[in-house]
Amino acid sequence: MRNTLRVGKPELLVPAGSLEVLRTAVIYGADAVYIGGEVFGLRAKAKNFTMEEMEEGIGFAHERGVKVYVTANILAHNDDLAEAAVYFKELSQMKNKPDALIISDPGMFMLAKENCPDIERHISTQANNTNYGTYKFWHDLGATRVVSARELSIYELGEIRRNIPDDLEIETFIHGAMCISYSGRCLLSNYFTGRDANRGACTHPCRWKYAVVEEQRPGEYLPVYENERGTYIFNSKDLCMIEHVPDLVKAGIDSWKIEGRMKTALYVATVARTYRKAIDDYYTDPELYAKNMGWYQAEISKCTYRQFTTGFFYGKPSSETQIYDSNTYNSDYIYLGYPEEIRADGAMRITQRNKFCVGDTIEIMKPDGRNIEAQVISMENEEGQMVESCPHAQETIWLKLSEGAEVYDLLRVAAPSEKELEK
């Protein structure tokens, strides 16, 4: 068995729910990106990728040395199998093939093995991979990577690494939303709404507010916790391991996975850039990583999140890992868009995501870690008319700023405080 302190850097694996977000993930530091096609993935509500978009996205990534993995991790029913076989054949025939498929169902695994044997197969966390015996089982069937169950500690992950073949990789979630159920296999959505989370249609009932009702007193809602408004008893804080990079390295985890195929480009860019810098700093010099901890903590808090926890990495979570009084995200910054094209006069074309105005001070977020304040000098709409703001969603604007920006720099602005909103 190999030494658990790896010679090379771990892979930073970042989610993407659309072509825009895939490009962002690649530009902002991902080593690999995972996406879903229009079928057989567990994020049916994400925009997801047509076959044409998948081909384009994989080509964009491969040109920059970044891998792309495609999810096919539903728990399949009988009527899924014939279509899945056709889908896997189509993936195998693409000019720009995925680097791997992420699969949880044994039947789907065998279909992929038969119909696209040239594409690697990774085992999803949905398969409940909690011990090295399970890892060896999948390795014997031809899997090249296993995604660990969310319920494993850092010690257990290290023990798995020491007891599996050198050529079998470990992938582990290190940041993002946590699911209340075992390894993400939730039945609440199916029970309450008839929409099966294990087939990609989760309605996120873990984020709903709950109370107790006594059978003989219908309509009288009793709080489950000491809170007169009820409680969000299943609502976990978000996972964040930015402060624990040394432990993840020592455990021998090959791929560090970010959760979030429903997230925006701003979220993906913020998280990818922060972990990219943390990993690179640590491998340059552990003291540099320690010195820059304040920057990582500040930056990672600029994306949407539900407070942070280390999940199961350091033992079973306590009551402190839940949020009982709210299901809303903290959101310190608002996404405005990114330069898609830059004219000779310096004006940049953006498709705006949120309203902002001439005279506003915004921030240019660069892939290399710099954040540059800039003032909005002017705006011009598609008809060439000068305007003072861009109030319409997805409006195309030609924008001039006081500072220069490049294609794929992200534009964002600090969210107003509660006091500012009250004015």
Image: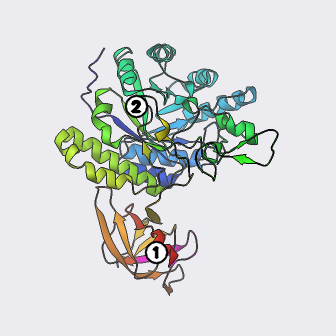
Q: Which residues are magenta?
A: 390-399
Q: Quadrant of residue 283?
A: top left
Image location of residue 381, percent across then percent down: 51, 80
Q: Residue at x 39, y 24 (%)?
A: 157
Image location of residue 69, percent across then percent down: 48, 37
In which quadrant of the rendered image does the N terminus lie?
A: top left
Q: Which residue is mark 2?
A: 313
Image location of residue 188, percent across then percent down: 68, 37
Nearest to the observer: residue 404 or residue 124: 124
Q: Residue at x 71, y 30 (%)?
A: 80
- The verdict on residue 393 being magenta is yes
Indicate which disc residue 420 carries: 1
Q: Quadrant of residue 190?
A: top right
Nearest to the observer: residue 214 or residue 137: 214
Q: CA distance from mark 1 to mark 2?
A: 39 Å
What kind of residue is marked 2?
Answer: Phe
Q: Residue at x 39, y 54 (%)?
A: 301
What kind of residue is marked 1?
Answer: Glu
Relative to 226, 245 lies left or right: left
Image location of residue 175, percent across then percent down: 43, 42
Residue contact between numbered discs 1 and 2, judged by CB atoms under 8 Å = no
- The verdict on residue 163 being magenta is no
Mark 1 residue element: helix
